[in-house]
Image (cartoon, rainbow, N blue to C red):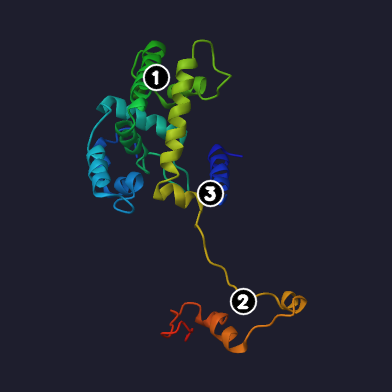
Amino acid sequence: MKRRDTIKTLLVGTLAGGAAGTTLQSCESEPIAEHVTGLTIGRTPFERERDKKLLNMQFFTDSEFDILARLCDIILPATDTAGSATEAEVPAFINFMSNDVESFQIPLRGGLAWVNTQALTRFGKGFTEITDTQQLEIVDDIAYPGKEPEGMKVGVSFFNRLRDMTMTGYYTSKIGIKDLGYKGNIPNVWDGVPQDVLDKHGMSYDPEWLAKCVDQSKRNDKAEWDDKGNLLT
């Protein structure tokens, strides 16, 4: 099973119970505002103002954001049927969360610096300047907890956090939800209590009530009631 399919399977079970050069201007776009705040739905005026402020704050430097974007796309690249993490504006989501939760800031900034230092030490260039193969070599060393080479625990801790935030950002975006195929609660067709159950308990429907309430041809009609609470339609 592919990694993305594994993630989707886990997330669907829970529900049932860009490019590296992306800039932070995307933080101000409507999709990200919907993504991280739900816009005005269920938000107080104070919360809406606070969300707007956080959306327009740049926590990461441009170079840090470029590294972040590349790592997010390594975690969740584009497929034939779904966009990448940057297409879902996950880096901007992580920027928002970093502004919102102060405890995220040092681990994320330190982790990005750690990754960039690894690239400089191994290949003599910054992370966004080395080849895809070289980038994956660094990521492979920190992507599998318990199997990392000696001295990589700091990188593993960072990458675990980033992977969790990337998946959270992606699979709460429009692109991610579409990729899951999750449709939410959908009403089914109810045609009343089965006849054998009614017979067992000596019960039956009033024909007039049955015609009004169980006729599926009228399932989209708006119910109307008289002043005494009797169902008319």
| Front residue (pair 40, 135) | 40
* Number of residues whose C-alpha sits closer than 10 Å to that of mark 2, classed few (under 14), some (14–19) or many (20 or more): few
| Front residue (pair 1, 131) | 1
The numbered disc on residue 191 is: 2
List x then y, in percent, for residue 85.
Answer: 40, 39
Instruction: Kindly tell me whether residue 89 is visible in this rendering.
Output: yes
Circles 1, 3 touching at the beta carbon (< 8 Å): no
Write the residue at 41% across / 49% down. Answer: 175
| Front residue (pair 73, 168) | 168
Write the residue at 47% across / 23% down. Answer: 139
Q: Which residue is under mark 1? A: 115
Q: Which residue is under mark 3? A: 15
* Closer to viewer: mark 2 or mark 1: 2
Q: Secondary structure at mark 3?
A: helix
The amino acid at mark 3 is Leu
Q: Gap between marks 1 and 3, in whole Å? A: 33 Å
Q: Secondary structure at mark 2?
A: loop
* Number of residues whose C-alpha sits closer than 10 Å to that of mark 3, classed few (under 14), some (14–19) or many (20 or more): few
Q: Compared to 156, does 165 lie above or below?
A: below
